[in-house]
Image (spheres, grey):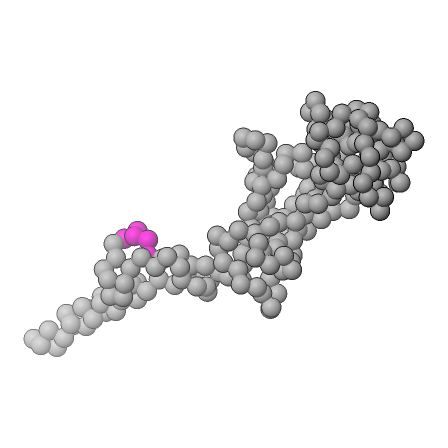
Amino acid sequence: RVRSGLPAADAALAEAECLLSESTLLAPFSGQVADLKVQAFQSVAMGEEVCTLIDLNSLEVEFRLLESELTSLRENDRVFVSLLTDDNVRIPARLDIINPLVEDGGLVRARAKLELGRSRPALFPGMNVRVTMERATPSAILVPKQAVVERGGRPLVFVYKPEEGFVAWTYVTILAENDELMAIGEELSAGDLVVVAGNLHLDHQSRVRIENEE
């Protein structure tokens, strides 16, 4: 064995097998490869980025909140994610992280983990989505968002007074809002006639005429 060089060959073989085993990198999870930067059989230097591995079954959405919403939000609150291309798709998610730092413009970064079922839509990292947050609010009067204008930095609505034939501005408190509606405090009552168009050109006690009684 010594004269034939077999022990040295066995040692070289064992070293080669060890190096070969170390040349295979196992990912901690299964996923899809994106941004592949190398080709097959290409030599790769230590620390060189090869690709990005994406776990499509564990996606998160990052979005920004107004600082005024922080007091009513908690981690694990329920949110819904919808696609910009299809509003009918509503994917439930749980608020995962709220970054405790207010950025310029009064915005706070937050992140939610999507709860994907078996029938998952076509989602890919980097997609633009719409995040909707739902929470219970006290009973309130709802008005369209376009009915609320600002004067002197305060929100108000114009309430039509049919007896006098003019509108009176009424400062209001906004309890909650979404993309279409605003929940108003006790300043409005059921049955009040609120101007929802052309109110940017109105003033207090401006005379108006209703074109369509319906």
Q: Position of residue 90 (x, y in %)?
A: 64, 58
Left or right: 119 in relation to 151: left
Quarter of image, res 15:
bottom left
User: Which image quarter is the N terminus in?
Assistant: bottom left
What residue do we see at 65% from left, 45% from top?
Answer: 75
Visible residue check, residue 138: no
Give the x, y percent position of residue 128.
53, 51
Q: Quadrant of residue 72?
A: top right
Count up the numbered dots: 0
Magenta stretch prevailing secondary structure = loop
Compared across the picture, whether 6 is left or right of 68 comes to left
Span highlighted in magenta in the image = 46-50
Q: Is residue 62 visible?
A: yes
In the image, is residue 49 part of the stretch drawn in magenta? Answer: yes
Q: Residue drawn at (79%, 24%), measured in percent from left and top?
A: 204
Q: Nearer the viewer, residue 104 or 43?
A: 104
Horizontal side of residue 103 vs 206, given as left or right: left
- Residue drawn at point x = 14 percent, y = 75 percent: 6
Q: Is residue 47 above or below residue 42?
A: above
- Residue depicted at x 27% and y 66%: 40
- The answer to whether residue 91 is above or below residue 211 is below
Task: State the residue in front, 23 or 105.
Answer: 105
> x, y percentage for residue 179?
68, 45
Q: Is residue 176 magenta?
A: no
Q: Nearer the viewer, residue 83 or 207?
A: 207
